[in-house]
Image (spheres, helix red, strand yellow):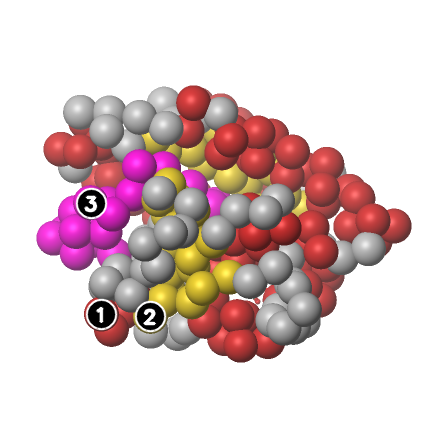
Amino acid sequence: MRHIMVLNAKGGCGKSTLATNIASYFATEGATVALADYDLQRSSLDWLERRPANRAKIHGVAGFEGGLRRVPRNADILVIDAPARSHGDELVDLVKHAETIIVPVLPSTIDMQATATFLKELQAIGKVERKQVKIATVANRVRDNTLIWDELDEYLLKTRVPYIAALREAQNYVRAYTRGLGIFELPEYLAWPDWDEWEPLTAWLRSVRSQP
Ligand SMILES: Nc1ncnc2c1ncn2[C@@H]1O[C@H](COP(=O)(O)OP(=O)(O)O)[C@@H](O)[C@H]1O
Ligand SMILES: [Mg+2]
């Protein structure tokens, strides 16, 4: 079973948005997928409750209650939606559950600053130092032709962590969440620009580059 975690100590950067879309991506590809929500805000579990019964099934797990005990044994992919404000021992514990970590970052000075601090803490964890977990960053809610986006792009290219995708700010994410879907499950005429932007992210997830 693959364990893919979406993690950043900063709130509101798109962890649940990425987690639900990654789960929907693999489910629509035919994989058996579980989605574990470690955040008491339950955004991923709420999304699953909205999911239509005729869509590819995703097993929800309340990670904040019982950890990963309820994850079905036959799952191919486990996506973990991590809580904000994870630091210290709690962060070390979370990282134990992952071989692949995606860190979403917003184009905002506060978020870049917080992420720089967070990446430092993450990289000092033994499991990360020993390269037993692969980490990548994703720029999220990008708006073209803004100075702050140029700054974020420059910052992410400079960090030692692979920077694999930039996702635009789009109502499609809001629309899809409301309907319990991922952007891959929206009609092509609406969602093709987002599909294109996700391509490097899903390619990375499918490749050995994201697996220790
Ligand atoms: N690419 C995007 N385009 C538009 N809205 C987005 C995008 N990513 C996230 N959002 C919105 O931003 C808010 C925070 O995202 P969320 O995934 O809940 O972050 P987190 O789980 O890190 O707190 C939500 O309202 C979500 O719908
Ligand atoms: Mg969340």
Q: Earlier in the sequence, mark 3 or mark 1?
A: 1
Q: Is residue 86 left or right of residue 196?
A: left
Q: Are marks 2 and 1 in contact (CB under 8 Å)?
A: yes
Q: Which residue is at 16% across, 47% downward?
A: 92
Q: Is residue 205 above or below residue 171?
A: above
Closer to us: 146 or 41:
41
Label ID, residue 62: 2
Neighbourhood count class around disc 2 (C-alpha, 10 Å): few under 14, some 14–19, many 20 upward? many
Distance from disc 3 to disc 1, alpha carbons, whole Å, reads 16 Å
The quarter holding residue 40 reads: bottom left
Question: Is residue 137 in view?
Answer: yes
74 or 4: nearer the viewer: 74
**Where, quadrant-wise, is the C terminus in this rendering?**
top left
Q: Amino acid at mark 3?
A: Lys
Query: Looking at numbered disc 2 in the image, what kind of residue is underneath it?
Result: Ala
Instruction: Read off the residue under disc 3.
Output: 96
Q: Is residue 109 visible?
A: no
Looking at the image, residue 184 lies above or below residue 174: above
Find numbered disc 1 in the image and state the secondary structure of the residue it sits on: helix
Q: Earlier in the sequence, mark 3 or mark 2?
A: 2
Helix, strand or loop for disc 2? strand
Q: Which residues are magenta?
A: 86-108
Could you tell me which secondary element the residue under label 3 belongs to? helix
At x 71%, y 56%, the residue is: 185
The residue indicated by pointer 1 is 66
**45 up-or-down from 117: above or below:** below
**Residue 126 painted magenta:** no
Q: Is residue 39 left or right of residue 130?
A: right
Mark 2 vs mark 1, CA separation in Å: 7 Å
Q: Residues within 10 Å of mark 3 (few under 14, many from 20)?
A: few
